[in-house]
């Protein structure tokens, strides 16, 4: 099978899979400086799919059902069925490619359009009320195959969320599925199977309100000063869907981005196994000092909130411009931020999904974080102040800014106890209990002296 790979609206080359071997060859007019990560020769061969492509394939269970539906028996065929590819990549078979007219776009610097692309100044909670779905049937939001598959496999939290591209029209209050490759948003529908508590039977998959969780912590990240795209939630039935604006598309001009795992050169299944040295060797040298500090702050933030799903595919670098030949990279906006600490034993309890401490461990202590700062050449005093300020800011603001502001409808959502024989708490109670537990852990592991935030120092850091 041959696939035509288009990038930045140009034919880059042809990907081929034959007898369990993979080949990629560039077009003659592509200059060496436009060659992709891990594909350094004009002709490339490998016995596994090149990570730059492998990491574009969603890990959602829906992939196996699309494969089944379209009779795809090889590995690369799925690329033709992806509707919301990362960055500017597009994949075509011969016939579709030949019918295509490619027009090169002007080259735009990401920094110059970033705020316009992100549109992150929404008010929390951002609930799209009375919006209607157009061309989105129930089976598109909740594919039967997905539920069936979910029952057969124990799903973790990460990389596996089903999603599809949509357009969002605030004037008409419409969320529309168009199959247009330039849609500026995508939706992660909630998975019914994860939010239904069974009075009898196995509840290992019970991970409710994941997308409310994501909206909450994405917003908190924004408020801490991190770049994140506009996002919102929409109620449907018993839970909420999540909509997010693409951070890599400016009115059809697309910016490529690559996750840390791809820079490291590993396949998706290794995303939780990444060590500090691998990041240092393959990622840190690609970014400037400001971004290194930003990344460190995000790691601290993630440990504080208990972002157990922070693995090497949930962090990315983005190219500075939309040119095919752009080589310089910046930290991309952040995405997929949630706490894993409210789901009990149903998800791994570790603080973050990266092994960046000197020993592999579940919980990070202050010493680990200071050591990481040292290795990232961040001044120790600065690192200490980031840990203290972030911890206090989180503890002092979580309830009033992120829980009390939720609607009563959300606060009172039932959250079943895993061993409660059908007894439930409310989401509000669960969030407040999470806060109490974080407080204990932050004191115990991060050795932060819990006190009311001192406005002056906090302001200094966040202004
Ligand atoms: N807003 C966005 N714009 C463009 N690409 C995104 C955006 N959010 C996530 N991505 C890309 O899509 C991938 C999957 O998104 P993510 O939110 O991590 O979903 P999941 O919950 O399935 O892991 C990410 O690894 C990232 O490369
Ligand atoms: Mg993810």
Image (cartoon, rainbow, N blue to C red):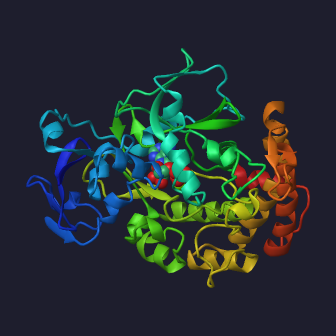
State left or right for residue 279 relative to residue 2.
right
Q: Residue at x 45, y 23 (%)?
A: 135
**How many numbered discs sit on the rendered protein?**
0
Extreme-top residue of the structure: 172
State left or right for residue 441 relative to residue 174.
right
| Relative height, residue 304 to residue 399 (above, below) | below
Q: Quadrant of residue 262?
A: bottom left
Extreme-front residue of the structure: 200
| Relative height, residue 305 to residue 427 (above, below) | below
Q: Looking at the picture, how far across and down is residue 126, in whole percent?
A: 68, 32
Q: Nearer the viewer, residue 334 or 174?
A: 174
Q: Nearer the viewer, residue 82 or 395?
A: 82
Q: Quadrant of the N terminus?
A: bottom left
Extreme-right residue of the structure: 451
Extreme-left residue of the structure: 28
Q: Quadrant of residue 340?
A: bottom right
Q: Nearer the viewer, residue 67 or 211?
A: 67
Q: Residue at x 37, y 46 (%)?
A: 66
Q: Looking at the picture, how far across and down is residue 415, in whole percent?
A: 80, 46
> Is any part of residue 338 visible from this angle?
yes
| Relative height, residue 196 to residue 182 (above, below) | below
Q: Looking at the picture, how far across and down is residue 273, in whole percent?
A: 52, 74
> Is any part of residue 162 visible from this angle?
no
């Amino acid at each position: 099978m041959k696939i035509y790979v288009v990038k930045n609206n140009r034919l880059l080359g042809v990907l081929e899979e034959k007898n369990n071997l993979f080949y990629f060859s560039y077009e003659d007019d592509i200059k060496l400086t436009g060659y992709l990560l891990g594909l350094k020769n004009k002709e490339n061969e490998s016995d596994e799919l090149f990570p730059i492509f492998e990491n574009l394939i969603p890990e959602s269970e829906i992939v196996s059902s699309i494969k089944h539906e379209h009779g795809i028996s090889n590995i690369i065929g799925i690329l033709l069925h992806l509707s919301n590819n990362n960055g500017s990549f597009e994949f075509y078979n011969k016939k579709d490619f030949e019918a295509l007219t490619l027009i090169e776009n002007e080259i735009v610097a990401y920094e110059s359009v970033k705020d316009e692309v992100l549109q992150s100044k929404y008010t929390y909670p951002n609930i799209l009320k009375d919006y209607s779905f157009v061309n989105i049937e129930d089976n598109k939001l909740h594919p039967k195959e997905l539920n069936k598959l979910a029952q057969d496999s124990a799903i973790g939290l990460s990389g596996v969320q089903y999603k599809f591209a949509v357009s969002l029209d605030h004037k008409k209050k419409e969320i529309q599925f168009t199959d247009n490759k330039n849609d500026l948003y995508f939706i992660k529908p909630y998975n019914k199977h994860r939010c239904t508590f069974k009075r009898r039977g196995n509840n290992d998959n019970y991970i409710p309100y994941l997308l409310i969780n994501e909206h909450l912590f994405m917003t908190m990240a924004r408020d801490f000063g991190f770049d994140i795209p506009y996002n919102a939630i929409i109620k449907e039935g018993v839970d909420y869907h999540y909509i997010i604006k693409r951070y890599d598309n400016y009115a059809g001009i697309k910016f490529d981005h690559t996750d840390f795992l791809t820079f490291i050169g590993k396949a998706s299944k290794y995303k939780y196994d990444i060590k500090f040295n691998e990041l240092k060797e393959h990622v840190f040298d690609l970014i400037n000092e400001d971004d290194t500090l930003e990344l460190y702050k995000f790691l601290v933030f993630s440990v504080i909130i208990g972002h157990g799903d922070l693995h090497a595919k949930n962090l990315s670098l983005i190219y500075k411009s939309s040119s095919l030949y752009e080589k310089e990279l910046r930290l991309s906006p952040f995405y997929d931020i949630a706490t894993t600490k409210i789901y009990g034993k149903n998800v791994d309890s570790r603080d973050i999904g990266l092994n960046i401490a000197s020993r592999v461990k579940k919980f990070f202590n202050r010493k680990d974080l200071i050591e990481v700062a040292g290795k990232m050449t961040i001044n120790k005093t600065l690192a200490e102040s980031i840990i203290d300020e972030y911890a206090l800011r989180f503890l002092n603001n979580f309830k009033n800014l992120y829980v009390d502001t939720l609607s009563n409808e959300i606060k009172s959502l039932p959250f079943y106890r895993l061993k409660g024989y059908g007894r439930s708490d409310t989401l509000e109670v669960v969030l407040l209990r999470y806060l109490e537990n974080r407080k204990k852990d932050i004191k115990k592991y991060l050795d932060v002296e819990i006190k009311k935030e001192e406005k002056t120092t906090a302001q200094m850091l966040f202004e």
